[in-house]
Amino acid sequence: MIPITVAWPFCKWAIDIFGPITACSRGIKFLVVAIDYFTKWVEAKALGIRARLDLYGNEWVDELPSVLWAHRTTHKNSTGETPFSLVYGTQAIIPAEILVPTKRVQSFDESSNGEGLRANLYMLVERREIAAIREAMNKQKIYKYYDKRVKPLSFKVREYVWRNNETSQAKDTGRLGPN
């Protein structure tokens, strides 16, 4: 619950290793995942240690680009925009819109497309500012929800406090652990 706000896309990233998961035919078991804090843009790279396995699992690594594309073109509640639109300034045409033409695809005019893209880029800064404001408001709403449930307690120095080990799920860390 620490607020992390950034001013523009790709300013700050979170990077993590995900796995191990079912190995694919190339022996890949791990993903390195990076997420941009502002746009929620996800990048993922499949890694694996070369090993000889008798049975290979699902071919999940072949589906990774499709999953990333779906994530990048889905509206996020925190910003009210898609990561793709916050990066490129326009909505993506998904493959399903080509197979089953939508009004947007049918009304496409190549001669005025360049002008429309320039207008979208001109408005991109404003859209990003609105997305940042929405995200800040969303974070405030989350903080209020969690803060409402917190019951403040204060203790005096040298006051004994009862700790229920089952409730706190504290583990015995031995003599080197905290008291």
Image: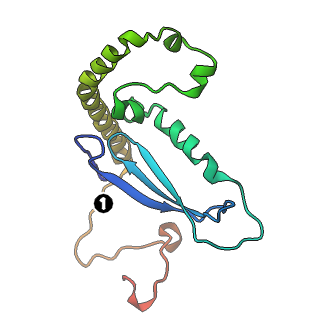
Identity of the residue drawn at 72% across and 71% down: 53
Three-letter residue code for mark 1: Leu
Front residue (pair 146, 131)? 131
Q: Is residue 171 left or right of residue 121?
A: right
Q: Quadrant of the C terminus?
A: bottom left
State the image coordinates of residue 177 (x, y, percent, origin top left): 40, 84
Query: Which residue lies most toward the front here?
Result: 111
Q: Residue 60 in the image: x percent, y percent?
A: 65, 52
Measured as percent of width and height from the top left, residue 15 is found at 40, 58
Q: Residue furthest right?
A: 54
Q: Residue drawn at (37%, 55%), measured in percent from left and top?
A: 14
How is this picture coloured? Answer: rainbow
Say which of 118 and 130 sits in front: 118
In the image, residue 137 sits, relative to residue 158, either above or below, namely: above
In the image, what residue occupies the spot 44% across and 60% down?
A: 16
Q: How many marks?
A: 1
> In the picture, residue 152 is in which quadrant?
bottom left
At 52% from the left and 14% from the top, the residue drawn is: 105
Residue hosting label 1: 153
Pinpoint residue 5: horizontal percent, then vertical percent.
26, 45
Q: Is residue 7 above or below residue 80?
A: below
Please tell me whether mark 1 sits on a helix, a strand or a loop: loop
User: As drawn, is 102 to the left or to the right of 25?
Assistant: left
Q: Is residue 142 left or right of residue 108?
A: left
Q: Is residue 1 visible from the viewing direction of this image?
A: no
